[in-house]
Image: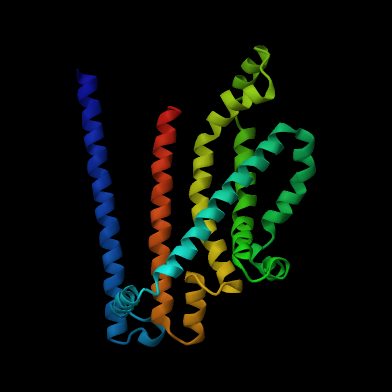
């Protein structure tokens, strides 16, 4: 009974702490917007350059009313989700290939290091020349930014699985597929989930950069258009939309994390 009571108290404290954290996060967000509005209203910050929350909100309402914002939101969101999934899946498949062959892993090791160090944004113009100014080019940029880091992190997780588990499987004459299915993959689930969280941000960076370079629609295109016509209300509106959508994607990944961790008893 004492153990059960202590556990209930612990869960209660965790809930209270979680609510406090969310409250502090909300207060911080409100404070930032208030400071932004006040500093631009009294021209401490130039409102022409830094806009203001009220100006951005008015533009948001206008864009919703005339229906010109949704097409850009949908395009960018679809490109980001597809780029996120492709980057994660390809990175996982490459990591599995590296894990399955020590020779292949050693051959690819220096190339992965170089590709990881290479600024992916710098090859954007090359992607534009190869694929042309279309959605495919945007997706390729988005995938390139996330796939290498996914490969490296997940492959490292595969290598760090407890050797004792692997030895037991080998004593039972398990083959590579069985070892991967029953030991390596389940043990690497937390790392794979962490990679998903990182890839949310990387996917958004890749897609927005791609839209900077080649797109004629999307939030990245709106940001570039806003800079070109000196409409910083449009720029900040696009940035706010990116923050909201990226947060929703991150929360979705967190929901998947809870399900998977519960399933694999982590």
* Residue at the extreme top: 172
Tell me which residue sits at (39%, 67%) in the image: 241
Q: Is residue 15 visible?
A: yes
**Is 94 placed above or below 137 here?**
above
**In the rendered view of the protein, which quadrant contains the C terminus?**
top left
Q: Is residue 266 visible?
A: no
Residue 90, percent from left and from top? 63, 46
Left/right placement of residue 160 relative to residue 123 reads left
**In the rendered view of the protein, which quadrant contains the N terminus?**
top left
Tell me which residue sits at (61%, 20%) in the image: 164
Residue 237, percent from left and from top? 39, 74
Is residue 38 or residue 251 the one in the foreground? 251
Tell me where residue 107 sits by quadrant: top right
Left/right placement of residue 17 relative to residue 222 reads left
Residue 14, percent from left and from top? 27, 39
Left/right placement of residue 110 relative to residue 262 reads right
Is residue 16 or residue 107 the one in the foreground? 107
Is residue 41 or residue 210 the one in the foreground? 210
Is residue 180 or residue 32 the one in the foreground? 180
Tell me which residue sits at (46%, 28%) in the image: 264
Residue 100, percent from left and from top? 71, 32
> Number of callouts in the render?
0
Tell me which residue sits at (43%, 33%) in the image: 261
Structure colour scheme: rainbow
């Amino acid at each position: 009974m004492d153990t059960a009571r202590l556990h209930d108290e612990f869960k209660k404290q965790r809930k209270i702490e979680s609510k406090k954290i969310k409250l502090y996060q909300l207060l911080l967000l409100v404070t930032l917007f208030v400071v932004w509005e006040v500093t631009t209203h009294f021209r401490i910050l130039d409102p022409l350059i830094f806009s203001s929350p009220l100006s951005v909100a008015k533009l948001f309402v206008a864009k919703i009313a005339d229906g010109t914002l949704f097409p850009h939101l949908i395009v960018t969101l679809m490109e980001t989700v597809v780029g996120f999934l492709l980057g994660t899946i390809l990175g996982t498949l490459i990591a599995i290939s590296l894990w399955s062959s020590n020779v292949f892993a050693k051959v690819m090791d220096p190339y992965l290091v170089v590709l990881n160090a290479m600024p992916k944004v710098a090859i954007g113009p090359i992607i534009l020349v190869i694929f042309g100014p279309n959605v495919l080019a945007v997706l390729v940029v988005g995938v390139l930014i996330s796939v290498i880091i996914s490969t490296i992190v997940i492959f490292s997780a595969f290598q760090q699985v407890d050797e004792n588990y692997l030895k037991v499987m080998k004593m039972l004459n398990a083959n590579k597929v069985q070892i991967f299915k029953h030991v390596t993959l389940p043990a690497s689930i937390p790392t794979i989930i962490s990679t998903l969280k990182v890839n949310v941000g990387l996917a958004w960076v890749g897609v927005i950069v791609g839209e900077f370079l080649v797109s004629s629609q999307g939030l990245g295109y709106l940001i570039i258009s806003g800079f070109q016509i000196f409409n910083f209300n449009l720029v900040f509106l696009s940035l706010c939309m990116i923050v909201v959508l990226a947060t929703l994607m991150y929360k979705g990944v967190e929901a998947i994390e809870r399900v998977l961790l519960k399933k694999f008893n982590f």
